[in-house]
Image (cartoon, coloured by chain):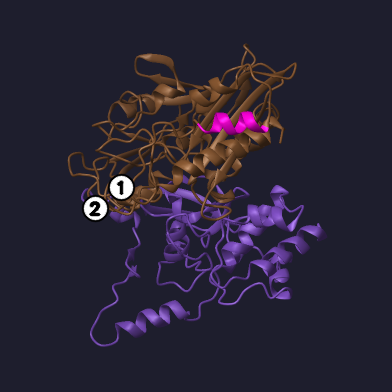
Amino acid sequence: MSTELPESAVPPPTGAGESSPAPTRRTFIATSTAVGGAVVAGGVIGGTSFIGPEEATAADGPPSSRVSLTVNGTRRTVTADNRTSLLDLLREHFGLTGSKKGCNAGACGACTVLVDGHRVNACLTLAVRLEGTEVTTIEGLATRGELHPLQQAFIDEDAFQCGYCTPGQILSGVGCIQEGHTDSPEEIREWMSGNICRCGCYVKIVRAVESTAGRK
Amino acid sequence: MHPFSYTRASDTREALNAGRRGGRYIAGGTTLVDLMRETVERPDSLVDITGLPLSEVTETERGGLRIGALVTMSKAAAHAKVRTLYPVVSEALELSASAQLRNMATIGGNIMQRTRCTYFRDVTADCNKREPGSGCAALHGVNRTHAILGTSDACVATHPSDVAVAFAALEARVHLLGPDGARHIPFAEFLLRPGSTPQREHALRKGELITAVEIPALPRPLRSGYLKVRDRQSYEFALTSAAVALHVRGGVIREARVAAGGVGTVPWKLPAVEQHLVGERPSGALWSAAAAKAADGARPLQHNRFKAELLKRTVERQLRVVGGTK
């Protein structure tokens, strides 16, 4: 059941995220670095500007489009610069920073999310193309406070070190299991090859995917 | 990324109208968005064609297979008919990119994807394909992954697609739809060698859409497969690759279809290898002798001399795998 979020309620990029009103590491770092004279302009953080509807209609602004999509069960309507990737929409507009920006070129898999149940690279997906779609990110995998089995398996198997690739690995693993490419460790390795782990936790990642698939 | 307008085409006519006005079609977007971010591509207007009814795989009356231009790589690879009739196609697809990219990228977009030449992708480098007349930085640069066949003094970039190698081998045809109507052309005529105009990469006319790739009927039983050799085992472009299809009846090879990837400026059909096979009985010696012709005419560059020998071995190996004789 998705809840409707009116456009005006879409948190600006300075917002703390989906549910927590507390300051986040991002806002803390942003405001900290502003100390010393620099001014953090409302709506511009990390070099990405939030394009509001008023800007969209301005004749000299960059071309923008309105798009409605469901993110982790919540319906969102937003007007975004046509150049905005799904990854930037999630991270900068919705405050969902679980999906990571690694290469920003479709070569590392850190940004992997599910769109209508299929795993895709959010960095190569233009947000304005996602009208009517359902997006699932790492923030939306747990249900009622209970971790998704693959999230739990990553903990049980100790399948990460630095953790940067982990959200993408888990979303990709969920896709891999749904697709049924988990018959052997070799098959899992091949079908998970779109997710790079520079810490080299592949053995344990494969184990986590394998054990989760086996429980299904 | 340069700003661009964005529209969704709700039907083919709308798409063609937008295309005629100079709009760039976008389907999976995995190459286009990447290159737009690098400012290699700077379209003013994108026309989203994913709503068009081009997502079917159908058997043709003649016994071939027609793969709609908007069928994703993952769907095409998983399709039962593709897997049973032309394993070389499903194997080439599944050895390409990653599962995520294959969920996004389409068959039409795949054969339209642009080269991975690092100088093409680097807007500060000289590249005749990107900036005609600026020169070719790869010719005397780091050119280990570049082409040895079909090159010119203007360009030595490889075509990166795997499935296009399978399509070239099988002598597929590309179905097109434009303002002047529908037409189809042989795959061999769809992608263009660089010559003195490397910026011209395909035979599409302005505003024309790819609607499907049709694989012709081939005599059965047909055994086929794809071998890809690369720097890492997965999620990497080919250094060399071989698409092989053989029809053997009564212990004699009646039909042979062979093409190579990773070595040519376009997917490289190997008619000399094919001709050497037809009418012969499968044997290890035959595979070896036929594959010896695979690099005929090769013009290696400073860093890719290894590719000629690697290509011969790749073709020989895949002939053995598909032909089934040691």
Residue B13 drawn above or below residue A129: above
Q: Which mark is residue A53?
A: none
Residue B278 placement, left or right of A188: left
SS at mark 2 in the image: loop
Taking the magenta stretch, the answer to whether it contains residue B288 is yes
Please state the horizontal and vertical placement of residue A77, each as a whole percent of the image. 47, 53
Q: Do the residues labelled 1 and 2 touch (CB within 8 Å)?
A: yes
- Specify the amino acid type for callout 2: Ala
Residue sitting at x 55%, y 63%: A196
Cα separation, mark 1 vs mark 2, equals 7 Å
Residue A86 placement, left or right of B79: left
Residue indicated by mark 2: B125
Please state the horizontal and vertical placement of residue A69, each as a whole percent of the image. 52, 51
Q: Can residue B212 be seen in this view?
A: no
Residue sitting at x 51%, y 30%: B259
Taking the magenta stretch, the answer to whether it contains residue A132 is no
Chain letter belonging to callout 1: B
Name the residue nearer the viewer: A212 or A82. Answer: A212
Residue indicated by mark 1: B120
Of all residues, the one furthest to the left in this rendering is: B133
Residue sitting at x 39%, y 28%: B191
| Same chain? Circles 1 and 2 | yes
The chain displayed purple equals: A
The chain displayed brown equals: B
Please state the horizontal and vertical placement of residue A127, each as a whole percent of the image. 44, 51
Q: What stretch is highlighted in magenta?
A: B284-292
Of all residues, the one furthest to the bottom in this rendering is: A36
Tell me which label, 1 or 2, sits earlier in the chain: 1
